[in-house]
Amino acid sequence: MCGIIGYCGGRAARPLLLDGLKRLEYRGYDSAGLAVADGGRLNVVRAVGKVSDLEKKGIERPLPGHCGIAHTRWATHGRPSEANAHPHLDCRERVAVVHNGIIENYLELKQELQAKGHAFRSETDSEVVAHLIEECFAGDLEKAVRLAVLRLEGTFGLAVMHADAPEQVVAARRGSPIILGLGEGEFFAASDANALLPYTQKVISLNDDEMAVLSPGGYHIKNLNDEFLQKEIEIREGRGEEADKKGFEHYMLKEIFEQPEAIENACRGRLLESEGVSKLGGLEPVLERLKNLKRLVIVSCGTSYYAGLCGRYIFESLCELHVEVEVASEFRYRRLKLDADTAVLALSQSGETADTLAAIREAKRKGALILGVVNVVGSAIAQVTDAGVYNHAGPEFGVASTKIYTSQLVVLTLMALLIGRYQGLSFTEGSAVIQALKRLPRQVKGILTDIEHIKDIAQRYARYQDFLFIGRQHNYPTAMEGALKLKEISYIHAEGYPAGEMKHGPISLIDAEFPTVAIVTQDATADKMLSNIQEIKARNGRVLAVASQGDGRITEVCDDVIRVPETLPILQPVLNIVPLQLFAYFIARSKGRDIDKPRNLAKSVTVE
Ligand code: M6R
């Protein structure tokens, strides 16, 4: 969703801010803007559309200023427009504010400020922050931001400038990430490390209710009690070069092809073959509690939710656990009893998803052990959990999640293997899981070599308006995820269903214009799946099957078949989703969609 970058140093700020914004584009946005200190005033430019549109504006003269703030906005309060784009200004255009998050008490504050004579120009909640700072300002920007922030309810990541303090950027956070980048004589503040990494790998993550003051000469960090804080400097790997598409047409395709490596990275150093078990350093502090765990509640959203649904089968198969999976945004409406024998596990690529964050905060309040599987190191969810495992899959830029989904399935298997070996799983069973995990990267590579066949099929199916995806047991979540991939990037209507549910309603939709994608790899449910496919064929429906390499029966009944290798049933979804990712990708491509940044979607969903 929204993205922030701020800069203070010796170089011209504008090109650095624009470069930072480009590195935040993958998060999804609809407008952008920047403010640069410019000879005693703030030069502000905003544009609806892409960062490239912003880049074209305000270039009549080079801006000399070397401190500035910039933002990409994903509309929440008010439609995408120049007036609603950030930075927002106070009445006298001396204060500029960029904001991520939602100010929940903005209406109340707005009324109070309007009563004092403040005139508002936008429909946003964020503008209230600029006027509040104006109201609190008496020559000291840091103090004014602190006083303003103390009045705010909701979530915020902020970067603020004042024309009277042109060499300062003040940043603050509560519930929305702010990361500082420490360069040589230059300092950055950003909502996402990807914006900083080309310039510095030295970063500091602000915690909630902390603020930072940056200037070309240095920085300091304080809490909201005005006390100085000493914080650890982390060294982040990479220089943001992953943001290169490396010759692929889209990030999504590149990330689909990175899956063998992502699976290897998830397993690296974590397979203890001699013991038939996994080793997960991030779970060691809570190992004693995990040994006696009785119940696991998985919370997540979107693709991560479907990974959670697969996780239920994985944990049930390897452990003696009662497993529930809950859409994170619904979790708080349940009256769940959570005790010390229960763990709540958050799955999140970004580690920023507001619904998932809210769910684990709720679970923490109720006394459960909070675990996480997160890809982004140091992200908000990683900070709230008691223990967890990182995916180590590298950044994912395509809005449609691909490599993190398969990586999540692998990490969940590693977690289940660890717990299962304390709960009755034998050495032989554990070793079989390890061997299957080791085969996965090669098997995924094999599927990727079938790209031309999958592309050909996708092009033939691209004309349909609606799709049904069906699967049973482990492949019921695969059906849901396959349908989600197709709808989010191609804008085609697709529904994922447990195959057995078809005759309870969706079968009435079937006709020659409503194709079905059936995930029918060899397992205990394969015969029942075949019956379901026959039912569709009897109603003139076209069927594309994802089937096992050796299955000779399937060509008799289905119109088209994509073959995948066999593995253990719990890991079969890792293989089965790969052709469906490609299927969605090639349909979206043939329709000319904006595959990496589909309309209305954001990579990190930071609002509830
Ligand atoms: O970062 P998270 O894994 O918490 O994100 C959850 C969903 O927003 C995300 O998976 C979304 O559904 C993707 N666009 C799916 O491709």
Image (cartoon, rainbow, N blue to C red):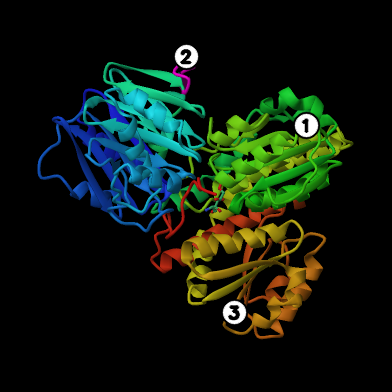
Give the amino acid at mark 3: Phe
At horizontal 51% and vertical 48% (from top left) the residue drawn is 605
Q: In this rendering, which labeled residue sits more in front, label 2 or label 3?
A: 2
Give the amino acid at mark 1: Val
Give the amino acid at mark 2: Gln
At horizontal 49% and vertical 39% (from top left) the residue drawn is 155
Residue 55 locus on image (x, y percent): 22, 46
Q: What element does badge 2 sit on?
A: loop
Provide the major secondary structure of the magenta segment: loop
Q: Between 219 and 120, which is closer to the camera in this rendering? A: 120
Counting residues from the start of the chain, the first of labels 2 and 1 encountered is 2
Magenta stretch: residue 231 in it? Answer: yes
- Please name the residue that numbered disc 3 is placed on: 514
Q: Between 509 and 330, which is closer to the camera in this rendering? A: 330
Where does the magenta region start and end? 224-235
Spatial CA distance of label 2 from label 1 is: 40 Å
Residue 79 locus on image (x, y percent): 37, 58
Counting residues from the start of the chain, the first of labels 2 and 3 encountered is 2
Ligand 1 closer than 8 Å to the CB at disc 2? no
Query: Residue 71 occupies which quadrant of the picture?
Result: top left
Residue 276 locus on image (x, y percent): 79, 32
- Please name the residue that numbered disc 1 is placed on: 277
Position of residue 228 relative to residue 483, above or below, is above
Residue 518 visible in image? no
